[in-house]
Amino acid sequence: MPKVVAENCVACGACADVCPESAITVDDVAVIDSGKCVDCGACIDECPSEAIEN
Ligand code: SF4
Ligand code: SF4
């Protein structure tokens, strides 16, 4: 399960856009719904700020 490093997140929304399960919502910071995440890693690759890690 990926984890958001909140202090690195700039709320750009790229991770939410790429997530195939719509498991990420972004308000002030990205939040991953662990009930929807299938651990594909796409959000980690997409984040420009290294704000999501495994
Ligand atoms: S690992 Fe995949 S399914 Fe899980 S939040 Fe990231 S993009 Fe979505
Ligand atoms: S892609 Fe990275 S910086 Fe952008 S909202 Fe997602 S976690 Fe935050």
Image (cartoon, rainbow, N blue to C red):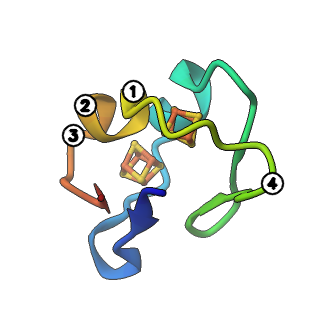
**Pointer 3: residues within 10 angstroms few (<14), some, or many (20+)?**
some
Which label is found at residue 42?
A: 1
Q: Which amino acid does label 2 sit on?
A: Asp
Q: Do the residues labelled 2 and 1 touch (CB within 8 Å)?
A: yes
Question: Residue type at mark 3?
Answer: Pro
Total numbered labels placed on residues in the image: 4
| Front of the two marks 1 and 4 | 4
Q: Which residue is drawn at 38% across and 59% down?
A: 10
Q: Is the residue at mark 3 in contact range of ligand 2, meaning its CB lies under 8 Å from it?
A: yes
**Disc 2 from disc 4: Cα separation:** 21 Å
Q: Residues within 10 Å of mark 1 (few under 14, many from 20)?
A: some
Above or below, comparing residue 36 to residue 33 in the picture: above
Does the Cβ of the disc 1 residue fall within 8 Å of ligand 1?
yes
Residue 51 appears at what percent x and percent y? 29, 60
Q: In this view, does 51 lie to the left or right of 37?
A: left
| Residue occupied by mark 3 | 48
Q: Which of the two labelled residues, at mark 4 and mark 3, occupies the earlier sequence position?
A: 4
Question: Mark 2 touching mark 4, by CB under 8 A?
Answer: no
Q: Residue 51 carries which label?
A: none
Residue at image coords 64%, 18%: 20
The reply to whether discs 3 and 1 touch (Cβ–Cβ < 8 Å) is no
Report how far apart the C-alphas of labels 1 and 4 lie in the structure: 17 Å
Tell me the element at label 1: helix
Left or right, 50 with reference to 6: left
Q: Is mark 2 on a helix, strand or loop?
A: helix
